[in-house]
Amino acid sequence: MSSLLKSIFDRNPGESEFHQAVEEVYETVEKVIKKNPQYQKAKIFERMTEPERLISFRVTWVDDKGDVQVNKGYRVQMNSAIGPYKGGLRFHPSVNPSILKFLAFEQIFKNALTGLPMGGGKGGSDFNPKGKSDGEVMRFCQAFMSELSKHIGHRLDVPAGDIGVGGREIGYMFGAYKKMQNEFTGVLTGKGQGWGGSLIRPEATGYGLVYFAQNMLAEQNDSLNGKTCLVSGSGNVAQFAMKKLLILGAKPVTASDSSGYIYDEDGISSEKLDFIMELKNEKRGRISEYADKFKSAKFFANDTKSDHNPMWAIKADCAFPCATQNEINIKDAKNLIAGGVKLLAEGANMPTMSDAIVELLKAGVNYAPGKASNAGGVATSGLEMVQNYSGIYWTREEVDTRLREIMKGIHDSCLQASKEYGMDGNYQAGANIAGFVKVANAMVAQGII
């Protein structure tokens, strides 16, 4: 391990997810730093890995029984060199500073790749919305925003949704912010379409993921038509990734949640996907109910004692991990390779472990890191910000066209950067380098601050 990495890890002890994200980036940008003395002199990488601001606060709210509940709230404002802090809010029991710092660090590069003026940030709480009533979620969101509102603004920090934070939660938080600040402003993205939201925003991450994969295959004179695809997750990203895969002639065959996964050998058709969307978005049910309804499918419960996920051993052409971080380990990677997967594009943030990425690249699998392939969500959040600034809202076709162009631009930037530094065709290296150089140059230009 380099002395630089060691010093960063020593300064952030016990933060394994953050360490993993930092090491993954540094391994590909080290030669860029060495080639540019101005980056070394200004200690750009050291500054990028230290949040400009890490805010921690208490969230106190009252449940339906009248009992007082206490949660932790956070906002990590990582880097503002190229624009206001931008990144989602996550409500999940696993939320802690390490996870949020890794997500905010990844967000720096993802946002830079979009070409839009957005810095990197992330936030959230260890609050779990699962099993809570609408009233409880509303009271929590209002309490959370009572503190967060002191640290955000439409030209300062513009949060969005993430795991556990969908349209309902964004609505409650926006309403609370509007009342507290006495102004209607685009301080959150992912808003409803009748009150400042952008068309295509719900679909954007899943659609953008598939557009990126489409560009990867086009480089090889291939397409998604006829491809069998493994998709993990069953939330927003997975749903719209499957929808776009179907439009482009591919066949998704899996979906999952925290209880396990379903495998439908016949394929998840548009009608079956409608069932998943109703099940997850309205009924908040479990994916096992899919197998109860459709006899072509089987449900497999999670085995917490297993050292791999059997879903990744199913024969397929493409894989789209859209659930959560570190869901693919090295054994899963070997199973994917053995099952014939030739392309893996990440829909979640850092779902593939470092040694698994090495294994995939060694086997010649076309691998796209999430900071590039799942940037469609934040890209469209950026477009929502632009629409909020101007007060003019674009049609569905206009937003979708811009999203396609942004994902093509990210794809091409990755390829160009990887070629420039002698790693031709390596999307992982290209994404890291292209994002790093853009932010590093802005930091150098703005001085030591």
Image: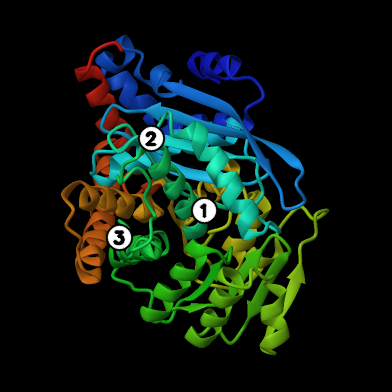
Mark found first going from the N terminus, 3 or 2: 2
Residue pictured at 63% horizontal, 31% vertical: 16
Label 1 SS: helix
Q: Quadrant of residue 200?
A: bottom left
- Does residue 340 appear anywhere in the picture? no
Q: Which residue is mark 2?
A: 120
- Label annotation for residue 198: 3
Mark found first going from the N terminus, 2 or 1: 2
Residue 235 sits above or below residue 369 on the image: below
Tell me the distance, in whole angstroms, between the alpha carbons under discs 3 and 2: 21 Å
Q: Are marks 2 and 1 in contact (CB under 8 Å)?
A: no
Quadrant (top left/top right/bottom left/bottom right) for the C terminus: top left
Q: Which residue is mark 1?
A: 169
Quadrant (top left/top right/bottom left/bottom right) for the N terminus: top right
Of badges 2 and 1, the one in the foreground is 1
Q: Are marks 3 and 1 in contact (CB under 8 Å)?
A: no
Instruction: Point out the residue furthest to the bottom here.
Output: 295
- Label annotation for residue 449: none
Label 3 SS: loop
Q: Amino acid at mark 3?
A: Ser
Q: Nearer the viewer, residue 258 or 232?
A: 258
Tell me the distance, in whole angstroms, between the alpha carbons under discs 2 and 1: 21 Å
